[in-house]
Image (cartoon, helix red, strand yellow):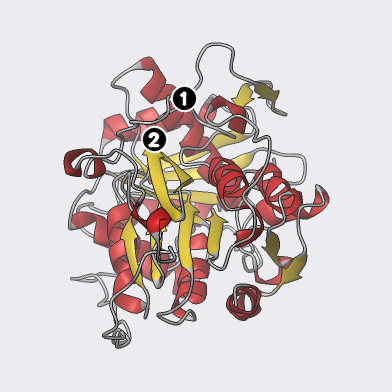
Amino acid sequence: MIDGRKIRVLIVDDSASVRQALKDILDADPEIEVIATASDPWVAAERLRREIPDVITLDIEMPRMDGISFLDKLMRQHPLPVVVCSSLVGEGSQTALAALEHGAVEIIEKPRGGSPREWKESSIHICDAVRAAARTRRPARLAAGSDVGQLAAPRTRAPTITRPPAPTRSATPTRPLTPSGPAARTQPPFTAAQRARPGHTPSSTPVRGSEPRLETARGSAKLSTSAVLPVARGAMLETTEKVIAIGASTGGTEALLAILRALPVDSPGIVVVQHMPERFTGQFAARLDSLCAISVKQASTGDSVLRGQALIAPGNHHLLLKRSGARYYVEVTDGPLVNRHRPSVDVLFRSTARYAGANAVGVILTGMGDDGARGMLEMKQSGAHTVAQDEASCVVFGMPAEAIKRGGVDRVLPLERIAPEVLTRTR
């Protein structure tokens, strides 16, 4: 809700079936209403002459004008919160990620109805993305009837995205977070084939059946972290090696870039959960890898946590930090939505509290909701140093605010001061 009224949404997609599916999903949410649908940006511009929505859902590939071109014009002339709704995969997912650089606040996949579970989870993600977009910081609202016709001015191609050259990396090979000695040779029993499968869970099975539930304001139950990982009885003692755990949601893609870009090649190993659809996290990791001095990759089960490397949770899978002897590694697992998310920041933070304890630094960034708030408190209680992004630099001050409210945050800092703080605390 916004000021006691429903969130008004304009759907822009060239597929009639997708428009109807999105309308059905959004209209079923008591906090959201679809005020109009449009088959392409030209029709959308005409709709904007009559009524200005709170949020636009936008397809990327459409006739007459592509979504990136329309988004670029919209952000320059009349900024509104935009959620990109895409089915692009592979190389095409780079185009969808480019939308974030042009001002979109979220990327979601088009509705999937392969099974009742998929449809329900898809509906949750779509409604949550629209709700988060409506709460983002943005300029004063555009009045209906303003000069929106120029949004549909002809353009033959999408704008070229220019990026700075990738920084030069050190020739020194990345090394595992492990001291020398017999303990360093202790390895989990994963085969090469198992490590290559993101969803493989050889050493743990999510708890099903009697899953803990938390009632939401909208009346639907959401699962707590215990649905994937029970509460730990104790944490690891402090060692010389450190781990950085980061959680982010709406607005987090650019916040993560700002932090990771500021880290040197010898920084401690990093594990990251960014709420993002399954088809886009691989390309997102590749984009970060091309722009940062450290290396960045999408995580797979059994990956060692290495100095100078960040591991990004694959979309639609939880990411857990584990430890075998002196070696940190990650496990990628399926399981239910936790706090309405998979991957869940709370799952990563709880596993970090359990297996790293005082050896970790936790960072919670911009995003709506409370995912990560409980886990950050657990990290602090286990001896970790915890940092939250401040309200002024957040796109949505939701997750950090909840973590602060629960008493799980040691320091609240603007985005540009988080990387120096992390480095100071891991020396």
Between 213 and 131, the one lying in front of the other is 213
- Disc 2, SS: strand
Residue under pointer 1: 206
Amino acid type at circle 2 is Thr
The label shown at residue 333 is 2
Instruction: Answer with left or right where residue 270 lies relative to residue 235.
Output: left
Is residue 98 among what the camera can see?
yes
Residue 425 in percent (x, y) is at: 65, 73
Please state, as top left, top right, bottom left or bottom right, where the C terminus lies in the image.
bottom right
Residue 92 in percent (x, y) is at: 20, 56
Please state, as top left, top right, bottom left or bottom right, where the N terminus lies in the image.
top right
Residue 422 in percent (x, y) is at: 61, 73
The residue sitting at the front extreme is 182
Q: Quadrant of residue 385?
A: bottom right
Above or below: residue 264 compared with residue 348: below
- Disc 1, SS: loop
Residue 288 in percent (x, y) is at: 35, 69
Amino acid type at circle 1 is Pro
Mark 2 to mark 1: distance in Å?
Answer: 8 Å
Query: Do residues under tags 2 and 1 come within 8 Å of each other at their CB atoms?
Result: yes
Above or below: residue 427 compared with residue 84: below
Instruction: Answer with left or right where residue 252 lies relative to residue 139.
Output: left
Residue drawn at (72%, 39%) of the image: 5
Q: Residues within 10 Å of mark 2 (few under 14, many from 20)?
A: many
Above or below: residue 231 compared with residue 242: above
Q: Residues within 10 Å of mark 1 (few under 14, many from 20)?
A: some
Is residue 361 among what the camera can see?
no
